[in-house]
Amino acid sequence: MEGLKLMYANLEESQNQVQHNTEGLNSNGLVVRRGQPFKITLSFNGPYMSIKDDLMLRTDLSMNPSKYEDDSVYLPEENQRKEYVRNRIGLLYMGTNNFITRRSWDFDQYESGILDICMMMLQVSNEHKQNWRRDYTKRFDPVYISRVVSAMVNHDDDCGVLEGNWNGNYSSGVNPSDWEESGSILKQWANSNFRPVQYGQCWVFAAVMCTVMRVLGIPTRVVTNFNSAHDTNKNMEIEEYYSEKGERLPHGDSIWNFHVWVECWMKREDLPEGYDGWQAVDPTPQERSDGTFRCGPAPVKAIRECRTDMNYDVPFIYAEVNAVVHRYIMCQSQILSCTTETDRVGALICTKGLGSDKPQDITSTYKHNKESARGFSVELNLDKMPVVGENICFSVIVTNLDSVQKRVREYANAQAKRYDTIPSDTFWEADNFIELSPYGKTVLQHQISYSQYSALKNEQLVNLAVVITDMATEKRLIASKEFNINFPFILIQVADPDTVTVGRRQVATVTFTNLFSVPVRGMLTVAGSALLEDKIHINVELLQPSETINTEVRFTPKSPGKKMLYATLNLDYNRAVFRGYRTFMVL
């Protein structure tokens, strides 16, 4: 008797994808998550009877299916899976460790076509081109996948997604600061036949990698390291050089104000026991790893323990968070003094808090606590967070630690700086003599007016340094601080935020006040995935000093869950850029 024939198979996509939280991952087929049962309905040409009919379901995953018996990226807590795999809304932290700024980011993993683009990224990688059989059989391994994606997010060495640019000239592409979501970057790359998207910097590389890894089901979070060292000579030490007036000299190693990478959660079966968990992976092209611009995955625990013998790239990341800094004061190629700092690099390492908009301090996972340097007789303090349009006010505190009177000289210097480079252009300086009584303390107040720093570009920071010289002994001490000048947030208010519902039209009010002393005009852009069909562009006509505009934006949510509405205002005056966002739950 002829056996049953399968006539139709229903993958029950709608039901399965709701239960697997994959209903937004648009693709041509069923998308399910590892470790969960799913339902399929089979139709035969006759009745199925288990007592006489045998039914076998066979799935081919690789030439070594036993590798799939254990889920090497499983997070046990539901709130962790929700944050590090399914959450499409993120915050990126920048600035300095004393003055943290944050940027909203939409990872866009549920946007139409993003899953297919991420899978395509694996298909056009060098690993797949060189040996497609080996590539397919190793895709079970998150270590392998993270190294492939780390290389493919930057376009160096391959046909990767983003081209980096740190020279300040973005005329042939997009200023890295203007990106606010991953979807447009990935779509532009795929639609251009894999030409690199111009341009990215570290937070853009990291955010795009976070999207790809979350789409592939690997828990991932974006991490910021403040005072991130780039150890060019690989001695795990950083050398900085200053003039006797406090001006930073253009040679030596660099310390980025911040650097952004990602951490991916995975088991490390290739390493000794105890190094599972969060792994640092950096897609920003800095140094080659096994001949390719990529970095990691390096176990965070191995970085903390300085296990430089372990895969992958532990020494490089260890230096980024733990390098010792030697600061030299020079005059005509002669070293006048040298101080050593052991706690400056990796001053703060943080990520978005679990289920929170606040940064989570994870510094202790990368490094052991060190005693702060003691015995300094000069301090430099900002009076408050600098805001564009206002004066920068700061104080220099000089303390005499001896029982005799001293006469000292103060040189103070302010230079423009990008987060990833050595400071350049001096735009303000001061020179004063101070009489110090025995064990006395003097506080010097300084101001830098807006007119003196107004020419700085939006993405630039300020490097402020002061050198105190004892006129009798010629002993010199230096103190410095780096900070960004903040643009206040655009205020976004949603009417009745507790009752925002799918399919019901809502109203948000976007508010901006001109803080400048001159009239301004510009372009306001409002966007929000699953809230607005397209970005809304609004011309801001001439706005007088201290004048406020309130703009109403109407939107209709398409799906439930936590959503984000964000706004950007680009002003013609001084190329200033203001940003703001509002998150809320859609019922």
Image (cartoon, helix red, strand yellow):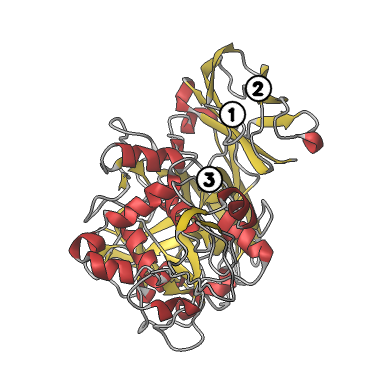
Whether 126 is drawn above or below 245: the answer is below
Where disc 1 sits, the SS reads loop
- On screen, residue 400 versus residue 585, left or right, reads left
Residue at 40% across / 72% down in the picture? 141
Q: Which residue is mark 2?
A: 553
Structural distance between the alpha carbons of marks 1 and 2: 10 Å
Structural distance between the alpha carbons of marks 3 and 1: 15 Å
Viewer-proximal residue among 34 and 282:
34
Q: Which residue is mark 1?
A: 532
- On screen, residue 36 versus residue 560, left or right, reads left
Residue 482 in the image: state x and y as whole percent. Answer: 50, 51
User: Which kind of residue does numbered mark 1 sit on?
Assistant: Leu
Q: Which residue is mark 3?
A: 110
**Residue 463 in view (yes/no):** yes
Viewer-proximal residue among 224 and 525:
525
Q: Marks 1 and 2: CB-CB under 8 Å? A: yes
- On screen, residue 168 versus residue 539, left or right, reads left
- Closer mark to the observer between disc 3 and disc 1: 3
Extreme-top residue of the structure? 542
Q: Earlier in the sequence, mark 3 or mark 1?
A: 3
Q: Earlier in the sequence, mark 1 or mark 2?
A: 1
Pointer 2: residues within 10 angstroms few (<14), some, or many (20+)? some
Where disc 2 sits, the SS reads strand
Looking at the rendered image, the quarter that the N terminus falls into is: bottom left
Residue at 39% across / 61% down in the picture? 282
User: Which kind of residue does numbered mark 2 sit on?
Assistant: Val
Looking at the rendered image, the quarter that the C terminus falls into is: top right
